[in-house]
Image: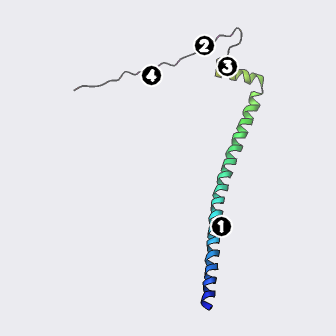
Amino acid sequence: MRLWMWGIVLLVIALLGWGVYTLASEQNTLESDWEGLQATVAALQSENAALREKIEYIKQPENILKELKSQFNYTEVGEKLLIIIPPAASSTATSTVH
């Protein structure tokens, strides 16, 4: 009879140990997920701040005009557009034959 009780006690201890192990494993997984989410939130907050600054910049009419001219080659009536193309790099290869 005592042997059965010891067997049951050992079984309960084993089950409790397994439960503690799975809980600890889940906690580690959740902690690493939490850290990853915190990093994502920080990156998104930084991106959000940069976008808000850009919105404030674009709200000014003169800045809209600057962006139109620089990105889309926009010209106003009476303006002329001058596009300067840099010289191409020399692509002549020199080789020596012996």
The mark that comes first in sequence, 1 or 4, is: 1
Q: CA distance from mark 1 to mark 4?
A: 64 Å
**Amino acid type at mark 3:** Lys
Q: CA distance from mark 4 to mark 3?
A: 28 Å
Label 3 belongs to which residue?
69
Mark 1 or 4: in front is 1
Viewer-proximal residue among 29 and 3: 3
The reply to whether the C-beta atoms of the residues labelled 2 and 1 are less than 8 Å apart is: no
Q: Quadrant of residue 2?
A: bottom right
Q: Quadrant of residue 12?
A: bottom right
First to last magenta residue range: 78-91
**Amino acid type at mark 1:** Leu
Task: Give SS at disc 1.
Answer: helix
Query: Is disc 3 surrounded by few (<14), some (14 to 19) or many (20+) residues within 10 Å?
Result: some
> As displayed, is residue 28 above or below residue 6?
above
Label 2 belongs to which residue?
82
Q: Is residue 82 magenta?
A: yes
Q: Is residue 63 magenta?
A: no
The mark that comes first in sequence, 1 or 3, is: 1
Viewer-proximal residue among 35 and 91: 35
Q: Residue furthest bottom?
A: 1
Q: CA distance from mark 2 to mark 1?
A: 68 Å
Identify which residue is drawn at 77% across, 22% down. Answer: 61
The reply to whether the C-beta atoms of the residues labelled 1 and 4 are less than 8 Å apart is: no
Label 1 belongs to which residue?
23
Identify which residue is drawn at 61% across, 79% down. Answer: 11
